[in-house]
Amino acid sequence: MNKSILVTGKNGQLGCSLQKILIEISQNLNLSLNNFVFASRDEIDLSKQNSISKFFSNKQFSAIVNCAAFTSVDKAESDFKLAEKINHLAVAQLAKIAKNQNIPLIHISTDYVFQGQQSKLYIETDETNPINTYGLTKLNGEKAVISSGCNGAIIRTSWLHSEFGHNFVKTMLELGKKKDNINVVFDQIGSPTYASNLAKVVLTMLSNQRTIEVMNSQLNIYHFSDDGYCSWYDFAKAIFELSNINCHVNPIETKNYYTHAERPLCNVMKKDKIKQHIPDLVIPHWKDALNKCLKEIQKSKV
Ligand SMILES: NC(=O)c1ccc[n+]([C@@H]2O[C@H](COP(=O)([O-])OP(=O)(O)OC[C@H]3O[C@@H](n4cnc5c(N)ncnc54)[C@H](OP(=O)(O)O)[C@@H]3O)[C@@H](O)[C@H]2O)c1
């Protein structure tokens, strides 16, 4: 019997997007939901070493995709211990299991491992220097994967949004309904990424013979986001324009918008490496992807 692929973070944005894409385009991918085990926090609690050991004690998989994470950037500042357990120690344990079972690990990381002060696009080998606790714990997770000696991929992504869970797009839609105008920072730049597009990349990597061979024999770090970049202000304006919401967006500076965690000012990642490794990869522009996401949000309300 063929072994299944384990996906953690079943109910998160990426976990849900993977399940949706698997149902929608499984024929093109040669993969279906039946090839996967999606695990929620109830089945495998990544903050508890024992829960992870117990989960794997009688199970073997053909690959692990780690979509679970402590993703609240501001809360991480006051709960370093929990963020470290989930984003670092659990990842170290998963990487060790992948190494022992001789299977690839696809681990999702973040552009927040970078400081955001560079005037050019970040490449995978650029120096990391996180400026907040979330970024630090995610970087510790990456380092643990590398030092475990397991094979697979670390995929850094940015500004995820989707029809699932909580994200900036859904927050703006809610605010736009209630307010005539809102303040949004214009001096933080990044690349919004529709979680479905990242899910397609992950599934392509798991179904394409060439990428499977690469993942079985080496560990690579990749950057993936939707194409182009913008500020949170541009992003908010696009959300309202595409949704015909009449809410004025006032551009404000980061220094006038207090958050617990500091954010990188300019994190835009170069995606040449992932384009080279995945044949025929088409990366949509963030605005087109946003439009798709808004339509899916609309559909899910009907
Ligand atoms: N969101 C972004 O803007 C962004 C940007 C860059 C990179 N990333 C990375 O992309 C990946 C996916 O992000 P996402 O937006 O899909 O995240 P998300 O929607 O916040 O989902 C996170 C998932 O992790 C699970 N989780 C949290 N604590 C757990 C624990 N102790 N044990 C087991 N599972 C636990 C959550 O379970 P529950 O559903 O039970 O809470 C949830 O399913 C993460 O690695 C994240 O760091 C995200």
Image (tube, rainbow, N blue to C red):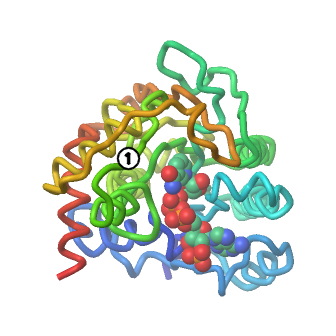
Q: Which residue is at the far top?
A: 119
Q: Residue at x 23, y 51 (%)?
A: 240
Task: Give me the residue at 63% from left, 59% from top.
Answer: 72
Looking at the rendering, which quadrant does residue 225 occupy? top left
Which quarter of the image is occupied by the C terminus?
Answer: bottom left
Residue 107 visible (yes or no): no
Q: Residue furthest left?
A: 244
Residue 256: quarter of image: top right
User: In the visual, does 295 lie left or right of 89?
Assistant: left
Q: Position of residue 55 (x, y in %)?
A: 73, 82
Badge 1 element? strand
Instruction: Give neighbour class at mark 1: few <14, some 14-19, many 20+ (Cα, 10 Å).
Output: many
Residue drawn at x 69%, y 27% is 128
Task: Determine whether the beta carbon of the residue marked 1 sits less than 8 angstroms from the nearest atom of ligand 1.
Answer: yes
Q: Compared to 60, does 258 lie above or below?
A: above
- In the image, 56 versus 239, the foreground residue is 239
Residue 60, position in %: x, y?
65, 76
Q: Label 1 amino acid?
A: Thr
Can the viewer see residue 254? yes
Q: Which residue is mark 1?
A: 193
> Which residue is situated farthest in the front direction here?
180
* Residue sitting at x 43%, y 76%: 35
